């Protein structure tokens, strides 16, 4: 059945997902982990646990490698730019692929390509041939892969669990992501200090074998191809749908501001760890791990919710909390105070992101899921390159503290604006 191509400005009713097969009961599963009763989701989570630890190891090792080779704030920002700009530029094509082809096969392909990218970076680093342009180029390759991987994975979650467990599944997936943020950076900090960055890249490549194997073991309904429609018309139809859906548009705008506000802290973390607090790569690992700890707690708290109503308020107070925490971090003079602030940042950022993801996925019909989640990926990841370049430029001119403080002010302004819009017109749900 062809996806409708002419939304007229109203908000389409979400697709009835009763046909999505529910998982059978799994005795002993606590309410917080209820999505684990679905076999496909259990496989997905097992693969994610292994692979995401490797991903965070590579993220930290790559930042440290750029910092070690250049000691340049601008090049740190440029590395983030190269790694994420493709998510913004190619996001619509990724959403198109997720709505026109088997999401399951798309994700297996992207995970395989990500594995090859990690092995390439490892080979260059371990042989001592790596140069900054290698890092930037391979970061761009990974960004292009993620442009297709992110909407495919986001849209696949509901096929693994069904609508009733969607908020729990998204929260648990976020919790796993951030548990890996605790473990991965800590391991990376120790490995970088002991044997160098190349080992982190190699271990990340190996970790992809777990997620590829788990994806291959899933049992999903056969994909039914849609009637042929012009790809350009399909892409533009997705843009029109998201623009005319007022609630989706508001949430995406809120998350765009949240992404831009958070980039200074993320991009400049190596400078805080080494130049300001003099703690080196181990300090960087501790800071990132502390942020991950708060994020896990935040997503597990959200996982207990069974209703979508009230998630808009969660986005507001989480945004305000994030802004305040960025300001506290920016002006902190002590490493251990900054370490204590990081869990607050992780808690609030992931509560906001998981709430936004769940709200959008609940509001949209399945035929628009891939393209709409591509727009979500463009806001939470694809806008990051612009924020990273701005962070690098601000830090080079005014210093890292001023750049992070500017992000905190933007987060507070975005939360206040979103709160005012909710008073005028609450989000349905």
Image (cartoon, helix red, strand yellow):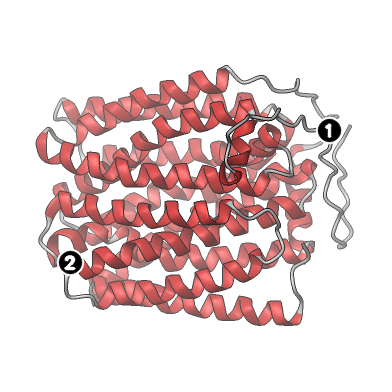
Q: Is residue 297 visible?
A: yes
Q: How crowded is mark 1: few (under 14 residues within 10 Å), some or many (20 or more)?
A: few
SS category of the residue bearing label 1: loop
**Residue 17 horizontal/vertical position (percent):** 81, 40
Distance in Å between CA atoms under marks 2 and 1: 52 Å
The answer, for residue 389, to whether it is visible in the render is no
Q: What element carries label 2?
A: helix
> Residue under circle 2?
335
Q: In this view, does 403 lie above or below 350?
A: below
The N terminus sits in image quarter:
top right
Residue 109 versus residue 188: which sits nearer the camera? 188
Whether 304 is drawn above or below 112: the answer is below
Quarter where residue 247 is shown: bottom right
- Res. 57 image quadrant: top left
The quarter holding residue 337 reads: bottom left
Residue 58 percent location from the top left of the image? 30, 38
Residue 303 image offset from top left, x and y in percent: 57, 51
Q: What x and y, as percent, mark residue 410?
A: 46, 76
Residue at 59% across, 53% down: 304
Left or right of residue 341: residue 96: right
Task: Identify residue for label 1.
Answer: 19
Q: How crowded is mark 2: few (under 14 residues within 10 Å), some or many (20 or more)?
A: some
């Amino acid at each position: 059945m062809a996806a409708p191509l002419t939304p007229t400005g109203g908000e389409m009713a979400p697709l009835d997902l009763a046909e999505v097969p529910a998982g059978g009961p799994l005795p002993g599963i606590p309410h917080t982990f209820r999505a684990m009763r679905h076999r496909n989701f259990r496989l997905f989570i097992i693969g994610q646990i292994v692979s995401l630890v490797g991903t965070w190891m590579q993220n930290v090792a790559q930042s440290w490698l750029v910092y070690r080779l250049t000691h340049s704030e601008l090049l740190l920002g440029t590395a983030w730019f190269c790694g994420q700009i493709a998510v913004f530029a190619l996001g619509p094509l990724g959403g198109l692929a997720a709505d026109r082809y088997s999401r399951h096969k798309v994700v297996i392909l992207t995970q395989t390509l990500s594995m090859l990218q990690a092995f390439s970076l490892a080979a260059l680093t371990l042989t001592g041939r790596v140069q900054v342009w290698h890092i930037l180029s391979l970061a761009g390759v990974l960004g292009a892969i993620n442009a297709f991987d992110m909407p495919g994975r986001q849209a696949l979650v509901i096929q693994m669990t069904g609508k009733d467990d969607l908020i729990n599944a998204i929260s648990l997936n976020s919790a796993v992501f951030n548990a890996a943020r605790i473990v991965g950076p800590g391991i990376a900090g120790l490995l970088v200090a002991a044997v160098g960055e190349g080992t982190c890249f190699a271990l990340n490549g190996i970790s992809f074998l777990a997620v590829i194997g788990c994806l291959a073991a899933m049992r999903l309904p056969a994909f039914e191809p849609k009637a042929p429609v012009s790809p350009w018309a399909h892409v533009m139809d997705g843009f029109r749908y998201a623009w005319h859906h007022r609630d989706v548009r508001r949430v995406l705008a809120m998350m765009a501001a949240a992404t831009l506000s958070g980039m200074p802290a993320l991009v400049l973390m190596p400078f805080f760890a080494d130049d300001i607090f003099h703690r080196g790569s181990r300090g960087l690992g501790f800071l990132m791990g502390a942020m991950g700890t708060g994020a896990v707690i935040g997503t597990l708290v959200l996982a207990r919710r069974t209703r979508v109503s009230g998630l808009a308020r969660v986005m507001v107070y989480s945004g305000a909390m994030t802004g305040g925490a960025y300001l506290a971090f920016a002006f902190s003079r002590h490493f251990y105070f900054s370490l204590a602030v990081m869990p607050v940042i992780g808690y609030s950022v992931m509560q906001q992101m998981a709430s936004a993801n769940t709200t959008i996925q609940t509001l949209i019909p399945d035929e628009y899921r891939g393209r709409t989640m591509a727009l979500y990926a463009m806001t939470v990841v694809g806008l990051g390159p612009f924020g990273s370049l701005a962070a690098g430029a601000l830090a080079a001119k005014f210093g890292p503290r001023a750049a992070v403080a500017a992000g905190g002010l933007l987060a507070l302004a975005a939360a206040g604006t979103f709160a005012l819009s909710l008073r005028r017109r609450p989000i349905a749900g």
